[in-house]
Image: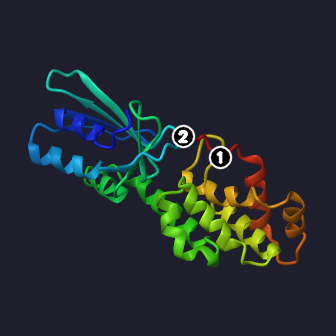
């Protein structure tokens, strides 16, 4: 099913939703029988596109929707504040505004891990190479858009080769994920580094400007398995 509005139709039919934090211990059931409560969640879960990617992790929050008779309608996972995973889609659905769903969770006291995620995103944005500052927000929101990554790679070509590699390695080091999976935007630096010869990466690590964060970035680039994608 490749319809961005398909999930909205399911939420419209829901009488309740069970919300479970997958990386913490929060669990609540929210009554959606009142139209205003249901409309707020619908708005927060508005999907803008289906780019086709699949995150490697299981998500941070699971939403289980039920009808008035208690029959389960759908199970949806919220990933990294930016996307939803649902079995009826081929890949994830990108949220129009992930912060709205974060606020919805915060209002129900399911917020501790979102503060951590927000800090991680800020750290990642701060590590964006200077040549890509104008694209940082777009790459965070839509990291799987090939045209956007291609544009980023072309902008980086204007940077001196060794400096370029060092900046990309430092960007890699700003990532947080490991084998269990990581946010899709954290793959962008590696996708650009894929076009650099290994010899150039080795040479950059021997440059006097190289430090621990560059070594950490190289370790992450070479050792962390690629994030799963469709």
Which residue is denoted by mark 1 in the rendering? 178
169 above or below 66?
below
Which image quadrant for residue 147?
Answer: bottom right
Q: Coloured how?
A: rainbow
- Give the number of marks: 2
Left or right side of 64 for 50: right
Name the element at disc 2. loop
Mark 2 neighbour density, 10 Å: few (under 14) some (14–19) many (20 or more): some
Locate residue 76, reporting x and y percent.
36, 36
Identify the image quadrant of the N terminus.
top left
Left or right side of 77 for 173: right
Name the element at disc 1. loop
Asked whether 54 or 27 is in front, the reply is 54
Mark 1 neighbour density, 10 Å: few (under 14) some (14–19) many (20 or more): some
Asked whether 225 or 91 is in front, the reply is 91
Locate residue 103, reporting x and y percent.
30, 57
110 above or below 16?
below
165 above or below 183?
below
Left or right side of 7 for 33: left
Counting residues from the start of the chain, the first of labels 1 and 2 encountered is 2
Locate residue 45, reporting x and y percent.
30, 48
Which residue is denoted by mark 2 in the rendering? 57
Which image quadrant for residue 160?
Answer: bottom right
100 above or below 32?
below
Identify the image quadrant of the C terminus.
top right
Residue at (42, 48) in percent of width and height = 83
Locate residue 104, reporting x and y percent.
27, 53
Disc 1 versus disc 2: distance between alpha carbons?
A: 10 Å
Residue at (61, 71) in percent of width and height = 128
């Amino acid at each position: 099913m490749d319809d961005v509005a398909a999930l909205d139709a399911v939420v419209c039919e829901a009488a309740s939703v069970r919300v479970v934090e997958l990386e913490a211990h929060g669990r609540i059931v929210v009554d959606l029988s009142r139209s205003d409560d249901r409309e707020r969640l619908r708005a927060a879960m508005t999907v803008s596109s289906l780019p086709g990617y699949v995150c490697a992790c299981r998500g941070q929050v699971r939403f289980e929707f039920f009808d008035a008779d208690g029959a389960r309608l759908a199970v949806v996972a919220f990933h990294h504040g930016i996307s939803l995973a649902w079995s009826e889609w081929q890949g994830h659905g990108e949220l129009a505004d992930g912060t709205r769903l974060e606020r919805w969770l915060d209002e129900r006291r399911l917020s501790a891990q979102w503060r951590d995620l927000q800090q991680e995103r800020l750290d990642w944005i701060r590590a964006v190479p200077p040549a890509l500052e104008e694209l940082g927000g777009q790459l965070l929101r839509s990291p799987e858009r090939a045209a956007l990554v291609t544009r980023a790679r072309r902008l980086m070509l204007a940077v001196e080769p060794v400096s370029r590699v060092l900046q990309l390695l430092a960007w890699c080091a700003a990532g947080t994920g490991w084998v269990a999976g990581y946010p899709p935007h954290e793959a962008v630096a590696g996708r650009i580094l894929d076009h650099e010869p290994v010899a150039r990466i080795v040479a950059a690590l021997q440059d006097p400007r190289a430090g621990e964060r560059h070594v950490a970035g190289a370790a992450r680039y070479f050792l962390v398995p690629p994030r799963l994608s469709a």
